[in-house]
Amino acid sequence: MPTLHDLEILARQAGVILRAGYGQRHTIDSKSHAIDLVTETDRQAEAFLLDAIQRHWPGDSILAEESGTHDGDGGQWIVDPLDGTVNFAHGVPIFSVSIAYAEHGTVRLGVVYDPMRDECFAAERGRGAFLNGHPLRVSATENLAQALLVTGFPYDVWHNPDNNLDNFARFAVRSHGVRRLGSAALDLCYVAAGRFDGYWEIRLKPWDVAAGGLIAAEAGAKVTNLQGGDDYLSPPQSILAANAVLHAQMLAVLQGED
Ligand code: IPD
Ligand code: CA
Ligand code: CA
């Protein structure tokens, strides 16, 4: 099994690739929808991570955003080589590398690295969450009216009426504000760091939230799906993270009870 330090090294190395590609001209392709983008930097960072994982942990399986599933008998790596591609492609310096390691379906290790700020968020299940080695704790804000929230919108937002805009409007008039940062992995880490008080989103993929979800939980967040259940990785995916008191208030709003 890899160590948390192994994941940190890999994330920092992939971060070097992202930093080198940042601000350069890109070939930008669309994937499932017109606004679901991929650049050659996404592919380069993923190719680097796949190669390194397969060389050092040849028995493990890998789920990676750009290349899908790579089978193996050991643990599972869940990799988003560039979370925040739309920001990256537009020259907005808010994006990250996200790497999680799971055993028997339980995420054990998670690292999210922001190469533009040199911020490495990391957690091992049961051992707390850290930013560049310093312990993290979620905010103690217990009143939604004083909370700063963050969310995002699915790539089919143009066409699917179930697009989270209604929730955005409801929280915007009940809180200090709702931000849209553009990297789900960083959104969760910012909750872990107490920068945001709460985060929710719908229809994400495991690579967006596997590492960040563990980091938020290890920093003291309650992390569930929008029904309040434990599974925020499997479809139909949704996620809500905040301290327990705020989590209950946010769940009530999301379920239309407030
Ligand atoms: C996206 C980001 C964004 C979220 C999107 C994700 P990508 O990941 O995490 O914040 O709102 O839905 O797909 O495509 O940049 O890796
Ligand atoms: Ca992503
Ligand atoms: Ca990505």
Image (cartoon, rainbow, N blue to C red):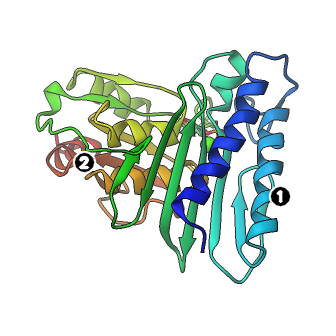
How far is disc 2 from disc 1 in space, using C-alphas?
Answer: 41 Å
Q: Is residue 106 visible?
A: yes
**Numbered marks: total:** 2
Q: Residue at x 52, y 64 (%)?
A: 234
Residue 190's image quarter? Answer: top left
**Which one is nearer the viewer's eye here, 24 or 170?**
24
Which of the image's four quarters has the N terminus? bottom right
Single out the residue that lies furthest toward the right.
27
Q: Residue at x 34, y 63 (%)?
A: 127
The 10 Å Cα crowd at callout 2, few under 14, some 14 to 19, many 20 or more, is many
For label 1, the residue is 51
Residue 141's image quarter? Answer: top left
178 to the left or right of 4:
left
Q: Residue at x 33, y 67 (%)?
A: 126
The 10 Å Cα crowd at callout 1, few under 14, some 14 to 19, many 20 or more, is few
Q: Secondary structure at mark 1?
A: helix
Frontmost of labels 2 and 1 is 1
Residue type at numbered disc 1: Asp
**Which one is nearer the viewer's eye here, 220 or 159?**
220
**Which one is nearer the viewer's eye here, 182 or 135?**
135
Single out the residue that lies furthest toward the bottom.
73
| Image coordinates for residue 183, horizontal then vertical, percent | 54, 34
Which of the image's four quarters has the C terminus? top left
Tell me the tag on residue 251.
2
Residue type at numbered disc 2: Leu
| Image coordinates for residue 224, horizontal then vertical, percent | 34, 58
| Image coordinates for residue 4, horizontal then vertical, percent | 52, 60
Tell me the tag on residue 115.
none
Q: Is residue 118 above or below residue 59?
A: above
- Circle nearer the N terminus (2, 1): 1
Q: Secondary structure at mark 2?
A: helix
| Image coordinates for residue 24, horizontal then vertical, percent | 81, 17
